[in-house]
Image: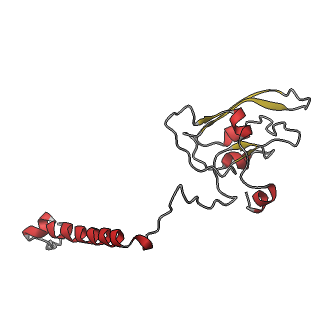
Amino acid sequence: MGAKVKVIKREGSSLPERLYLVEVFKGMRVTLGHFLRNLLDNSKLYVRHYPEQQPEITPRWRGHHRLTTHEDGSIKCVACFMCQTNCPSRCIMIEAGERLDGKEEKMPVRFDIDLLECIYCGYCVEACPKDAIRMDTGIFSVVDDNPQVMMKSLAELVATPGAFDEEEYKKGGV
């Protein structure tokens, strides 16, 4: 009971084909052609001239986080830990405490977000029952040399303003 083996002749048995030199030079010719065309006439390039020309950011854009406040200036967050529990990257750290403004609910004593760990999925915004956390700041550039700067604290999150007005934010479907 022998297996039937079909022998197929291998293509490319000449020396230049086995060394791939012809194909390498063909590829280099295409690359050089693109390079020279773009060098001589760069008007057809699709390039964003950042930072001179800022990109248009829609209300649905997920940028840096911020914590919202009531009209009286108190934080909307009630430290329910829903955003921390729902975060797949575990970048939110909350410590709850008693409210000092007379309301009968908790408030965060510590609310830290590590932007180096965050994957900007928006699950924290979806999980919040009080609409206390948002990602509508319009800040999209997240770069720094110091990792301590990328850790946003409660004071920084409350001080960060939103980039869109309330009607535009709600209309954007966020």
Q: How many labels sit on residues?
A: 0
Q: Residue at x 36, y 70 (%)?
A: 38
- Name the residue at 73% across, 61% down: 172
Residue 91 horizontal/vertical position (percent): 61, 37
The image position of residue 78, as x and y in percent, is: 81, 36
Q: Could you say which is closer to the camera, residue 65 or residue 173? A: 65
Above or below, 118 relative to 13: above
Quadrant of image for the N terminus: bottom left
Specify whether 154 is left or right of 19.
right
Position of 7 relative to 87 (above/below): below
Q: What is the x, y in percent for residue 83? A: 70, 41
Identify the residue at horizontal 12%, vertical 66% (top origin): 18
| In the image, residue 150 above or below residue 19 | above
Pick out the residue farthest to the left: 15
x, y percent for residue 132: 77, 43
65 or 165: nearer the eye? 165
Image-quadrant location for residue 85: top right
Horizontal relation, residue 30 to residue 62: left or right: left
Colour style of the rendered protein structure: secondary structure
Q: Is residue 101 left or right of residue 53?
A: right
| Front-lying residue, 75 or 145 | 145
Please tell me which residue is depicted at 81% across the width and 41% down the height of the picture: 69
Quadrant where the image shows the C terminus: bottom right
